[in-house]
Image (cartoon, grey):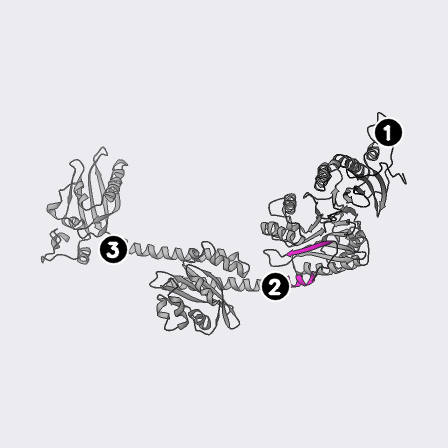
Amino acid sequence: MAAAEHDGSGRNRHGAVTGPGERLALNRMGSFEWDLDAGTLSLDGSGLVVFDLDPDEFDGTPEGLGLRIPPDDGNRLAEAVRAALDGGAETYGSYFTVRRRDGVDQWTHTQGRILRDGGGAPRRIAGIVRDATAELAHATVLRKLESARARQATIVQRTTEALSRAVTVDDVTAALTGAGALERLGAEGLALSLVENDAMKVIALSGESLEILAERRFTRLDGSLPLSRAVLTGQARFVTSLAELAGEFPLLADYLGRIRYEAAAYLPLIAQAKAIGGLVLFYRRRTEFSPEEQNLCLGLAGIVAQSLQRALLFDQEREFATGLQASMLPRRIPEISGGEIAVRYHSAWSGREVGGDWYDVIALPRDRVGLVVGDVQGHDTHAAAIMGQLRIALRAYAGEGHPPSTVLARASRFLAELDTERFATCMYAQVDLETGGVRAVRAGHLGPLIRHTDGRTGWPKVRGGLPLGLASAFEQEEFPETRLDLVPGETLVLCTDGLVEEPGTTITQGMEALAHAVRSGPQEAGALADHLSDRLWERWGSGDDVALLVLRRAPDPGTHRAPRIHQYVHQADPEGLSEARYALRQALRDWGMPDLADDVELAAGELLVNALLHTDGGAVLTMEVLPEPVRRIRLWVKDRSSVWPRRRTPGEAATTGRGLLLVDALATHWGVESRGDGKAVWCEFDAPGSLHGHGSERDGW
């Protein structure tokens, strides 16, 4: 029938050239026969029309079709035929393009049947060719629609996933403005506002040139701008030409020339039937918003609105909880003489509730000060409430003048009687800043860290008891005291475990990190507290609260005429002995008396070793210049033992007992004095050039 209507030349029976629509309607299919042995291919008239070939320009060979088939398509078609011939297939089919005379690419489909001889060898192929443009055009439209739906589903899914992890309002804005956020939303710019009383507050901007909108962070909720109009009416507005809004919204005209966008979707954020804010999505090149795209924008607005509503409620609850917790911490730290104190408190980065961490500084009689850090079990307002009661009770017991062990025992009993299953860990220390004496007790808590004057840090072994509450429940209210010495210029650091715990690591690693940060930190207490907060709390991204207390005893350099140094040497600390000897030698050099260094260093070593070996604890070494009546050096070694040293006369083969004999031989004078709960052994050396008799003071020996 097609042959009767056309002669194969592209003209119909009336002699007129057929148009594309008429050609597609009447000549969509033709046939061919391919003689594989002779290498010839014949096309009927309709087949020539499909390939847009005149009879006189087709040479009757497969290669002749190359006039219309692009090389890549021709190679792909030849490969399909070859695979069918070699694979023993009976049929094949393939899509390819035909480049027509007018330059338009036409999708074409061919299907052939392979005819073989008795031995299975292919001899001929008979088949059809057809114009598949309309068919594939419809399929392309369907694919585009399906692709658009898939893209929209991806946008919704990825946005929902990103916002599902948002807890606070800051989290929501970070999810909408962070890396890849605009791509997730399918937009090129974003502005987010919240309703506050009768105003709109811009809380997030993202996209090139939109920073200018921050010039008006607050705008009245009066409908004078497109977003406030959308919020007031509850109706979204989709605009493909922002310039057209200038007449309707004069306030917008100031920004249109500086905003590099052409289209925008103004979306109210509705949660629980109430407008809580507005969202604007900006686009550079968009000529329309299809119904599907409008529904996508409305869906995104709904997701953002729900996330913001949850975040606003969370922030309100957390503000209440943290306010409750803050009200239970001391409002002010008492001023102390002889030192400086700094405290820091950080709430956890995340989490709905607050914790029970606390600190306290208690002024005590006789110029002493009580230092407390603790942590009530749990992370909720109940823990914060218990913390407040326990802090007040512990402060009261300490203020009554009880020793530290009694203070914690009574606090444990108080917590056990509160009718709660919570327990608490605690570190309490009484510090005498005049003498440097520290009485420390622990209840299941991390011990103190001390930074010495030479920069070294150490964790003294402070004996401990069970956590408060548990100790009373198990009838083990024993909290043994540990005596420490804090020499002038040394720093004591107390903290809760949030400062040294990092997910995935051991607490030992956190303690090492804290010690390193203290060693490298500044001397002043407040600056050191800030240094530790910056280096550790923010480093962990802590999910736990942190209480930090730093006490530094005031340095005691003496005066220009009578300088002085102090050094604490921990028991069984060889490095401390070496550092002490070095500090003595360096000080004598600075004071202009290097000739005394050997004698002073030797005598100090003997006194320190004697104190560390024969007493239960460390020793405080002090060296000072006494300018009157004659310039001389005095060396002190103080320990906490009340047993006085005894000078012996060792035999020739003895390996010990010569320390005091050596001190007696080196020093001008020496002696021993009672000092509070211990003693001090001292010796003096005349400065070079001084006229003074050599001997020893043996009163009481």
Kindly give the residue lying farthest to the top in the view shown.
653
Name the side, left or right, on which 208 lies relative to 316. Answer: left
Dot 1 lies on which element?
loop
The magenta segment is: 319-345
Which of the 4 image quarters holds residue 253?
Answer: bottom left
Q: Is residue 384 above or below residue 128?
A: below
Q: Earlier in the sequence, mark 3 or mark 1?
A: 3
Circle nearer the viewer, 3 or 1: 1
Q: Which residue is mark 2?
A: 319
Can residue 547 be seen from the camera position used here? no
Residue 11 versus residue 215: which sits nearer the camera?
Answer: 215
Q: Is residue 528 above or below residue 329?
A: above
Badge 1 crowding class, 10 Å Cα cut-off, few under 14, some 14 to 19, many 20 or more, is: few
Q: Which residue is mark 1?
A: 650
Which of the 4 image quarters holds residue 358?
Answer: bottom right
- Do labels 3 and 1 touch, CB within 8 Å? no
Q: CA distance from mark 3 to mark 1?
A: 117 Å
Three-letter amino acid code of the residue under disc 2:
Glu
Three-letter amino acid code of the residue under disc 3:
Ala
Let me know if residue 322 is in the magenta part. yes
Badge 2 crowding class, 10 Å Cα cut-off, few under 14, some 14 to 19, many 20 or more, is: some
Q: Which residue is mark 3?
A: 134
Q: Look at 61% across and 48% down and name the residue there.
A: 502
Name the side, left or right, on which 241 lies relative to 327. Answer: left
Q: Earlier in the sequence, mark 2 or mark 1?
A: 2
Q: Look at 78% across and 60% down and name the residue there.
A: 396
Dot 3 lies on which element?
helix
Q: Image quadrant for the C terminus?
A: top right
Residue 542 versus residue 304: which sits nearer the camera?
Answer: 542
